[in-house]
Image (spheres, rainbow, N blue to C red):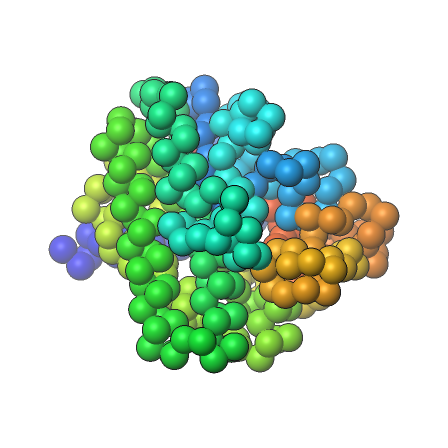
Amino acid sequence: MAANWMRRTFVAAACASAALLTACGSSSVDSAINPDRFVIFGDGLADQGQLGTSFSVNDGSINNWAAQFASRYDVTTTASSKGGTNYAYGNARISATPDVAGNANTPTVVKQIDTFLASNKINDNDMIVVSAGVSDVIANITAFVNGTITEDQLLANATQAGADLAAQVKRLNSAGAKHIVVTGTFDLSRTPWAKIIDQEQRLSQVMLALNNKLKIDINELGGKQVLYIDAAYQVNLFQGSPGSYGFTNSDKAVCNSVDAGAGNGTGTGQINSALCNTSTVIDANYNRYVFSDNIYLTPEANRRLGDYARDIVVLQW
């Protein structure tokens, strides 16, 4: 049983070494499935501009990993606020309110799925994408740093967030989803923000607690209908071996768009890439950077993550 669990839930590692990903990251191999619609739920990592912009450099390109993933199947996605089927919302948490920036009106992942299922049916040829956990990690580590929760509570909350996300994956499967791609949080211990708040080790622990619980709980659904994409592993490769992916800077935010408000949830007066465009970057070669702000990815890093997801789907499905 343990061997099967490892094979299914860590399958992303099969194509995750820098050398192998370079070989297959832009693969033109056809997938055995051909989705004609992508339905996306999640937080800022997958938000495609619900409020007009995404958490990246807003340069008019595909700057969102889920949108890039869909584009590899010649499917165009747009935010649900614009009539599309990408329900992911910046700063959204999985089930808790308010959002990580204190806004009670931001729909949680649970609410996003409620909204979709209330008036839509999942089709056999849909690709469902669930990408969440970043906002929950930010919220909980901030509470810990501020002294409002203990370290035990921090890890317990992360584990519960993983369980809550898995419950939504199971819910979608029960509603008829035959192809669900799931990613939890990437490893925020590798972000510029981790160094700013001096919490690299705890951020890594929180990521593992959330993602491991997610993987354990979705394992019972099997790999034929649910596929876990190891975004944490892949972003770690971008950050740790940037030259292998065409990046020259993996430690610094390229945007300088400071938000006087709560922004992306990391506090007031911080860089917020939702306000970032080609006029608010410190380097015209912004796509040579991994991070747009102190949390989120540049357009190129997003596209490479989306390509990686597609390659794993081709390998497994």
At a point 47% along the width and 80% down the height, the residue shown is 147
Left or right, 256 with respect to 135, comes to right
Left or right, 15 with respect to 57, comes to left
Tell which of 189 and 158 is nearer to you: 158
Tell which of 293 and 299 is nearer to you: 293
Which corner quadrant of the image does residue 254 belong to?
bottom right
| For residue 288, above or below residue 150 | above
Which corner quadrant of the image does residue 241 belong to?
bottom right
Left or right, 95 with respect to 45, comes to left
Residue 57 visible in the picture: yes
> Horizontal and vertical percent for residue 64?
60, 41
Q: Which of the image's four quarters has the N terminus?
A: bottom left
Residue placed farthest to the front in the image?
A: 104
> Horizontal and vertical percent for residue 315?
38, 39
At a point 68% along the width and 36% down the height, the residue shown is 52
Tell which of 183 and 241 is nearer to you: 183
> Horizontal and vertical percent for residue 216?
25, 55
Q: Which of the image's four quarters has the C terminus?
A: top left
Tell which of 52 and 62 is nearer to you: 52
Residue 234 visible in the picture: no
Left or right, 286 with respect to 177, comes to right
